[in-house]
Amino acid sequence: MPDKQFVVIRPVRNVLGSLRVPGDKSISHRYAMLAALASGRSRFENFSPGADCNSSLECVRALGCHIERDEQDAVIVDGLGPELQAPSSPLDCGNSGSTMRMLSGILAGQPFTSELIGDESLSRRPMRRIIEPLSLMGAQIEAASGDCAPLRIMGGKLRAIEYRVPVASAQVKTSVLFAGLLAEGETTVEEPTRTRDHGELALRAFGAIVDRSRNRVTIQGGQALKPLEASIPGDISSAAFFLCAAAVFPDSNLVIDGVLLNPTRSALLDVLTAMGSRISVLRVEEQHGELVGTISLLFGKGKNVVIAGAQTALLIDELPVLAAVAPYTAGGLEVRDASELRVMESDRLSAVTRNLEAMGAQIQQTADGWRIPGGQRLHGAEIESFGDHRIAMAFAIAALRAQGETLIRNSECVAISYPSFFEDLERVAER
Ligand code: S3P
């Protein structure tokens, strides 16, 4: 078992074996929230075990829905239909930006006032991006300090809007679509570049009609949702850590089963292929609109890769681990247009630079990305996770090929998305 405060990672000889990863975080959040608005009992197998999705479940419980786990550890949610119950205390979103931003869309359409709070990191993250469209729809929202949480949402009848999201954000798109479901009329959201489409697919899985054409999504308000029984695919952003590890060991052979392959989430496979990995995708099937399958990865040598523009938005959660292994690749990596990384659970742009430098890497940080040459050797170091789950996991992976041991501070934060990460890492690490 990892220590509560830090973990020490020793280098490995190879990454080998097969693995399943926990249920997808983005889908788990959306299913939990939409289950609340459906009339009747929903049941989800392989629901994300992370603290973030638990925050969503606890908020849904505080809004009056009965929630339990059955003998198979599936999550059961008894939905109340479009009108939820006023919570008796502030809704605690913990570390979860997804909970706060997407739930706000639902709360905007409720006939009561609710307050949303979060931890220190979440209370620093920008909320103007949801306050603006939800206010245009008729909700009254107050942010305690500037644009940040705590938020006070005085919900009520909403009017449909046509909204162009200024930053590429699936959370914002989904928040407006959830509000659009509860509004009168037809709401359209247009995004600057395509982002993950789980909001649209989940709404359809619960029986709503959602139209999409290019970057525009439209929903008619007032549609009733039906409960859903589903098994949630493995989280490809969690699988990303092991795939990136396997990508930098010459004898690696890794298979990940039952993993999400939604094209708006699987750009990582294209990047790893460009970096040289030989990837096969097997046994693909569709589950409630989401593609699921098996990924197999063998090492291969590639060239320099540049991630920019629309591709950056699709890879936003995978950039820290891609950067963390980039020094070991043959061609290195350049990332552009990633200033969003600065306003995530930590300033991920600086966190990656600081930690790669601590390991002796050459890295150039730009205003919105990094330039990281390939062919480097790194040494073990003390890594600061900044309490950010993806930084802790990214550097546990970088540590596998470093010389000497690496200590990851505040490693317990991996529980935000992947509580069994270190145990799973040991299963595929060959020493
Ligand atoms: C998420 C969207 C992304 C991502 C986050 C989860 C989602 O954020 O970083 O981890 O589930 O919609 P943005 O909405 O800022 O793109």
Image: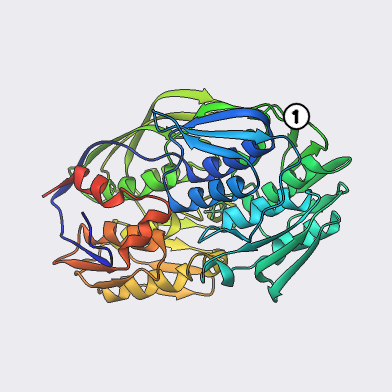
For the residue pair 262 and 109, the one nearer the viewer reads as 109
Observer able to see residue 234: yes
Q: Is residue 403 left or right of residue 257?
A: left
Circle 1 sits in a helix, a strand or a loop, which is it? loop
Quadrant of residue 270 within the rendered picture: top left
Farthest-out residue, front: 88
Residue drawn at (35%, 53%) of the image: 303
Q: Can you name the residue that lies furthest to the left here?
A: 431
In this rendering, the answer to whether 141 lies above or below 317 is: below
Q: Amino acid at mark 1?
A: Ile
Residue sitting at 51 percent across and 43 percent down?
265
Q: Residue 209 lies in what quarter of the image?
A: top right
Q: Residue at x 56, y 65 (%)?
A: 118
Q: Residues within 10 Å of mark 1 (few under 14, many from 20)?
A: some
45 vs 177, left or right, is left
Q: Position of residue 218 (x, y in %)?
A: 78, 39
Query: Would residue 171 be found to the left or right of residue 218 on screen?
Result: left
Q: Position of residue 292 (x, y in %)?
A: 46, 29
For the image, the number of numbered tags is: 1
**Which residue in the structure is indicated by mark 1?**
209
Q: State whether residue 75 is above or below residue 323.
A: above
Q: Quadrant of the N terminus?
A: bottom left
* Spot occupied by residue 197 in the image (x, y as percentages of width and height): 62, 41
* 371, 32: nearer the viewer: 32
